[in-house]
Image: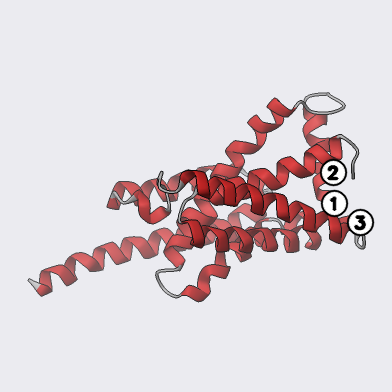
Amino acid sequence: MENINRETKKPKRRIENILLIGALVVAVFIIPLTGGTSSPFLYLSAILFPALWILRYRQPKQLYITFENLGRSVLWGVLAGAGLTLVRIGVAQVFPPLLEPARMLTQNAADLFHMETIPFPLFLALVFPGAVLHSLFYWSFIQSRALKYTKILIILPALLFAAAHMYEGSISAIHAFVVGLTASLVLQKTKNISTPIFVEFARLFTIVVLIQFRVI
């Protein structure tokens, strides 16, 4: 009986390793080489790897996909995202280029629709799906898999998130690392994927609101 259990665990472990290595290859090489987080590869892989895991093991809770502590998790995400924006604005008083990626994001979105300022409902429609997919890929799939090996690897999603922003420059990559590490830490507290989703969403939303109202 013990031998049978070991034999069934080996194929599962092999599949897990294949999925994890595939996700890492996408995060480290394909995404940066094909245009960073705007790449369709991110959107495909963000859906693909978690979906394969759920289909194979039918354990979405292992990917932090759950309704448990939902309200608390959303609140943690919003507070962390808004806090990251405040820290970013504070640091930008000394180092103004830190706000340039956010200004470019706002301007590019407005140019895309030939508008001076992008309406908030449209901005929400553009940002929220990306926040969900980022969270599924970096935090739901990669973090949940990496932490099965050692807790030190909680830093891995942040490093990969930073690598995906390298094409925007070193400033953006450093900021992405701080965002990624914050999201990883609060996710470990709440165990709910809604937390990194709202970290990502809240930080982008608050910075764009402040830019569009010319507060910063």
Residue 177, given in percent of the width and then of the height, sits at 68, 63
* Marks 1/3: CA–CA distance: 6 Å
Note whether 118 is above or below 84 in the view shown: above
Q: 10 Å neighbourhood of mark 1: few (<14), some, or many (≥20)? A: many
Res 200 visible? yes
The residue located at (42%, 63%) in the rendering is 145
Residue type, numbered disc 2: Arg
* Marks 2/1: CA–CA distance: 6 Å
Note whether 151 is above or below 117 in the view shown: below
The answer to whether 162 appears left or right of 19 in the picture is: right
Return the disc, 3 or 2, that comes first in the chain's sequence: 3
Give SS at disc 1.
Answer: helix
Residue 95, given in percent of the width and then of the height, sits at 90, 61
Look at mark 3 in the image and give the residue it sits on. Answer: 96
Give SS at disc 3.
Answer: helix
Give SS at disc 2.
Answer: helix
Look at mark 1 in the image and give the residue it sits on. Answer: 99
Q: Find out whether the residues at labels 1 and 3 contact each other: C-beta distance under 8 Å.
A: yes
Q: Nearer the viewer, residue 154 or 51?
A: 154
Residue type, numbered disc 3: Pro
Q: Find out whether the residues at labels 2 and 1 contact each other: C-beta distance under 8 Å.
A: yes
Quadrant of the snapshot with the C terminus: top right
Quarter holding residue 132: top right
Tag of residue 103: 2
The residue located at (42%, 48%) in the rendering is 65
Q: 10 Å neighbourhood of mark 3: few (<14), some, or many (≥20)? A: few
Residue type, numbered disc 1: Leu
The residue located at (11%, 74%) in the rendering is 2
* Marks 3/2: CA–CA distance: 11 Å
